[in-house]
Image (cartoon, rainbow, N blue to C red):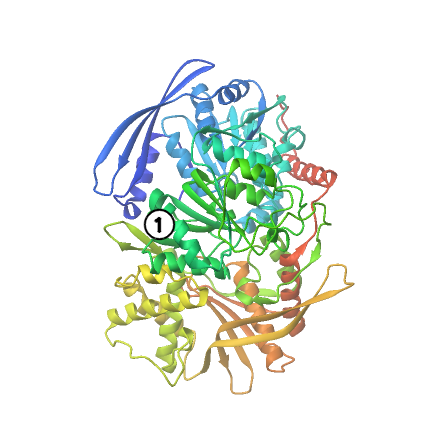
């Protein structure tokens, strides 16, 4: 909505008005922060805490927060030096930033963070102070006057090498949050920002406070590297000349002493890495057969009812194709009536409205930055090192596991698959002391295997790959390079003005009493294509109906739109295996798409004039798709399969593949999917010339044609290179190479100011 927020009362008022349509009278926390500090090392924070209950009754409380000794030390050192802070989970990074701002009244402070959600939360907390809060991508828009929606635009700005323009305040202090998640492009942007502020101040460089936690670095697959945090004094040398101090935030205000002891002693080899600040229940370690759903569900339901669904999270390394987890959530919904929010789209942030009031079922990665009273963690056994962590040393707790284990405020529950050995580094002697062990299996727990197995690098393909998943979690930088080398994307019709977008809701209110919402963006796209198919052909292949068993569809427009959405919801439940949303919406009107369906169907119809031979949900498959290792010395094979949205058959035997989307903006992943369908169709039909390939977004009318100069082989290379990038493990970049990359980024930044040099103070 905005590129950045200045934390001031009038801006927060604007934010409240902008979000009014999405706000609801359910439990919310609205803070008014008032800082009172008596000296540089005597800071007290008084917050007015207002709680809104479901009945709309507001209760005000006064709470006093006194920064810890560690937080006060950071505040004091940031007055004169740069500070790099290793901040443990729940240790109060935002509160520390708050204290820094309060202690530097009259000085300009900026805070840069990753997500829009963190930006809004931080801006809310700092609304009474002169502090600007940015996201990294919003910062790029401020520097270059170009809205940077994603890393692709950011890289374009970097390649163009245009001089940034900074018209804002010259900051005295810049706080960089979650720096362990920094990438090469974001490091370049950070250096550009600091350099721009320095030039605006006539050479006076700001002081830097770098916040993060090396053990919470879990985005290496996106190109993130924790050394941007740990080596900040080296990587930022010359950008900010102030001396550096290393400090820690070791106390966790989230974790209990029992949970921190469990994590430290059982998973971290006795290292007192994180210190809990309150007492809570002992962690529960369940040795279970995850497919014995009844026994597991009975055990977990008691805990969920105790802490409340709205205060419970179930975390797993992966959600898609997780059969055991799907069966558990279905049982919790169907048998026990527990509200569940399953995030199947694991590459998008969690929506607070959708997960509010429900058990949040999420991946480790998605839930980072969140916390709940009761957290149940799947996948804590040696199987983690078989695929997901095959490139990690097995004598150390994986960062992903550490993140999952440190989300619980009160009760932590660990699930160990009884078919698997414990994680090799696990201390069984400490497990008996620090946790309550329950064996729900008929077999005793196995002994851990020996540590020190070789890292499993190289290519490892799954038995089956779905076209819709092949580009998921592959960095855009790699996708850009693959696309540039093999295909051409031509824009045939640009995105229409925003006023012409078919902006159907992506979430809808499903329970007014409990203020529960459900995500429906995936339902929208499916319903639109299904309605178009029935309009053109009278069939419903999109919803998996056989032509001989077509259902009766209402004739009235309103009822018809609701019918398509209801059927699409049921279809998605069947395909994903997760039925909670469908169960929770059984009494819903499914009417959110009514004002938009006809317009969407008509817009799609304009692309197909006449009596074309259209095939919907065309099933495509290659049993042994071969991918060569990067070394070219060996290869592996997988079954590649998918369903093309529409195949337009021409009279001469040729065809056009249509990939139809109903999204805010087309992405590189969508183009990769279209290439895969083009290749599969050509090989399945024995064609040496590929079909035409169209990528169309119904929501904004954007239309692209994709061609491959090398024909079918070009499309094949796209798929092969994407699969190689996704499923190859190459190991960590050496520290010297990392530092060299940082030096190159800083050289690029220096060139932006050629002819405009200032002496940095």
Q: Is residue 60 above or below residue 52?
A: above
Front residue of 243/296: it is 296
Q: Which residue in the rendered view is the most extreme toward the top?
A: 39
- Image quadrant occupied by the C terminus: top right
Which of 258 and 369 lies nearest the eye of the viewer?
258
In this picture, residue 573 sits left or right of residue 470: left
Q: Position of residue 708 (x, y in %)?
A: 63, 69
Task: Give me the residue at 33% from left, 56% from top.
Answer: 336
Name the one closer to the observer, 481 or 181. Answer: 181
Residue 168 in view, yes or no: no
Figure label count: 1
Picture quarter with the N terminus? top left
Residue 264, percent from left and from top: 57, 34
Q: Secondary structure at mark 1?
A: loop
Mark 1 Cα-neighbour bin, 10 Å: few <14, some 14–19, many ≥20: many
- At x 32%, y 36%, the residue is 29
Q: Position of residue 565 (x, y in %)?
A: 33, 67
Seen from this angle, which residue lies furthest right? 633
Q: Horizontal and vertical percent for residue 349?
A: 45, 49
Viewer-closest of 474 and 397: 397
Residue 222 shows in this picture: yes
Q: Is residue 504 above or below residue 18?
A: below
Q: Which residue is mark 1?
A: 358
Residue at image position (49%, 62%) is 323
Residue 198 shown left or right of residue 371 in the figure:
right
Query: Residue 679 lies in what quarter of the image?
Result: bottom right
Residue occupying the point 74% across, 38% down: 736
């Amino acid at each position: 909505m905005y590129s950045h927020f200045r934390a001031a009362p009038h801006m927060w008022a604007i934010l409240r008005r902008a979000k009014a349509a999405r706000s609801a009278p359910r439990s919310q926390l609205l803070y008014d922060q008032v800082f009172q500090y008596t000296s540089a090392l005597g800071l007290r924070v008084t917050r007015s805490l207002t709680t809104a209950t479901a009945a709309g009754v507001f209760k005000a409380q006064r709470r006093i927060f006194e920064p810890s000794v560690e937080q006060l030390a950071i505040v004091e050192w940031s007055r004169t030096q740069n500070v790099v802070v290793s901040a443990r989970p729940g240790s109060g990074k935002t509160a520390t930033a708050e204290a820094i701002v309060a202690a530097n009244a009259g000085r300009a402070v900026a805070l840069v963070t990753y997500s829009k959600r963190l930006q809004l939360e931080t801006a809310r907390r700092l609304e009474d102070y002169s502090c600007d809060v940015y996201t990294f991508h919003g910062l790029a828009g401020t520097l270059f006057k170009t809205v940077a929606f994603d890393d692709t635009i950011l890289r374009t700005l970097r390649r163009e090498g245009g001089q940034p323009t900074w018209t804002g305040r010259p900051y005295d202090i810049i706080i960089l949050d979650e720096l362990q998640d920094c990438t090469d492009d974001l490091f370049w942007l950070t250096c550009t920002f600091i350099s721009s502020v320095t030039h605006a101040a006539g050479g006076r460089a700001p002081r830097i406070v770098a916040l993060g936690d090396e053990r919470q670095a879990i985005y290496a697959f996106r190109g993130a590297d924790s050394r941007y945090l740990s080596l900040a004094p080296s990587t930022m040398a010359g950008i900010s000349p102030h001396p550096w101090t290393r400090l820690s935030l070791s106390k966790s205000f989230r974790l209990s002493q029992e949970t921190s002891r469990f994590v430290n002693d059982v998973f971290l080899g006795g290292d007192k890495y994180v210190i809990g600040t309150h007492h809570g229940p002992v962690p529960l370690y369940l040795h279970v057969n995850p497919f014995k759903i009844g026994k597991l569900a009975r055990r977990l339901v008691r805990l969920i009812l105790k802490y409340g669904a709205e205060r419970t999270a179930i975390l797993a390394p992966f959600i898609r194709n997780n059969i055991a987890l799907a069966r558990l959530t279905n049982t919790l919904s169907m048998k026990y009536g527990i509200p569940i929010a399953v995030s199947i789209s694991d590459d998008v942030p969690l929506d607070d409205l959708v997960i509010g009031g429900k058990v949040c079922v999420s991946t480790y990665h998605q839930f980072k930055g969140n916390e709940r009273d009761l957290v149940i963690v799947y996948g804590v056994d040696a199987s983690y090192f078989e695929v997901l962590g095959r490139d990690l040393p097995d004598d150390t707790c994986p960062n992903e596991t550490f993140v999952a284990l440190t989300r619980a405020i009160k009760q932590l529950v660990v699930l160990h698959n009884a078919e698997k050995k414990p994680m090799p580094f696990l201390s069984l002697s400490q497990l008996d002391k620090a946790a309550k062990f329950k064996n729900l299996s008929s077999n005793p727990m196995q002994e851990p295997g020996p540590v020190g197995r070789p890292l499993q690098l190289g290519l490892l393909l799954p038995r089956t790959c779905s076209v819709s998943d092949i580009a998921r979690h592959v960095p855009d930088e790699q996708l850009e390079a693959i696309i540039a080398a093999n295909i051409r994307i031509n824009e045939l019709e640009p995105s229409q003005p925003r006023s012409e977008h078919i902006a159907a809701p992506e979430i809808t209110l499903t329970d007014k009493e409990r203020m529960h919402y459900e995500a429906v963006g995936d339902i929208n796209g499916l319903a639109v294509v299904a309605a178009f198919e029935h309009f053109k052909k009278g069939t419903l292949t999109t919803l998996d109906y056989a032509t001989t068993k077509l259902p009766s569809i209402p004739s009235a427009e309103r009822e018809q739109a609701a019918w398509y959405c209801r059927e699409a919801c049921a279809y998605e439940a069947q395909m994903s295996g997760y039925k909670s949303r469908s169960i929770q919406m059984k009494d819903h009107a499914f009417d959110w798409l009514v004002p938009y369906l006809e317009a969407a169907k008509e817009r799609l119809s304009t692309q197909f004039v006449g009596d074309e031979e259209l095939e919907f949900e065309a099933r495509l498959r290659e049993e042994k798709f071969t991918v060569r290792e990067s070394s070219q010395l060996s290869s592996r094979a997988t079954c590649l399969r998918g369903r093309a949205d529409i195949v337009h058959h021409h009279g001469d035997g040729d065809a056009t593949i249509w990939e139809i989307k109903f999204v805010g903006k087309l992405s590189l992943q969508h183009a990769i999917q279209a290439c895969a369908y083009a290749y599969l169709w050509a090989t399945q039909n024995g064609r040496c010339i590929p079909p035409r390939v169209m990528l169309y977004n119904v929501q904004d009318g954007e239309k692209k044609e994709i061609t491959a100069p090398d024909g079918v082989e070009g499309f094949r290379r796209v798929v092969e290179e994407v699969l190689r990038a996704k499923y190859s493990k190459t190991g960590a970049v050496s520290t010297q190479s990392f530092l060299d990359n940082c030096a190159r980024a800083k050289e690029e930044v220096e060139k932006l100011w050629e002819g405009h040099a200032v002496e940095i103070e």
